[in-house]
Image (cartoon, rainbow, N blue to C red):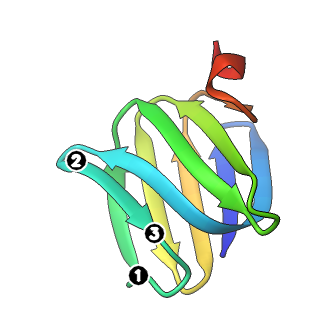
Amino acid sequence: MRLKVMLPGEVLLQCDVTRVVGQAPNGSFGMLPRHIDFVTALTPGVLCFTDTDDRESFLGHDEGILVKQGLEVLVSVRRAVAGKTLSELR
């Protein structure tokens, strides 16, 4: 899948991923490449994703929206910070 994280004035992150885990208002969700297409609101929290080299990374973010269509995962939030570990997000 291709993950693209957009802020109001820039594209924060674009990378190929094999897994995405996040939090919606009704609970946590996980996506793999063959997951059904969907749209969800995101609650403020941490988006976890695994790249194609099987390395896990994290994205702390405000509320926003996530759209998955085909192999494309688009995330739009007001503020976000990326890190390779949870401690980097602080």
Give the distance between the C-alpha atoms of the residues marked 1 and 3, in whole angstroms.
Answer: 10 Å
Is the C-beta separation of discs 3 and 2 under 8 Å? no
Q: Which mark is residue 31?
A: 3
55 lies above or below 63? below
What kind of residue is marked 2?
Answer: Gly
Circle 2: element type: strand
Residue at 17 percent across and 49 percent down: it is: 26
Q: Which mark is residue 27?
A: 2
What kind of residue is marked 3?
Answer: Met
25 lies above or below 29? above
Percent across and percent down for residue 51 are: 74, 61
What kind of residue is marked 1?
Answer: Asp
Which residue carries the number 1 mark?
37
In the displayed structure, does residue 15 sit left or right of residue 64?
A: right
17 lies above or below 88? below
Counting residues from the start of the chain, the first of labels 1 and 2 encountered is 2
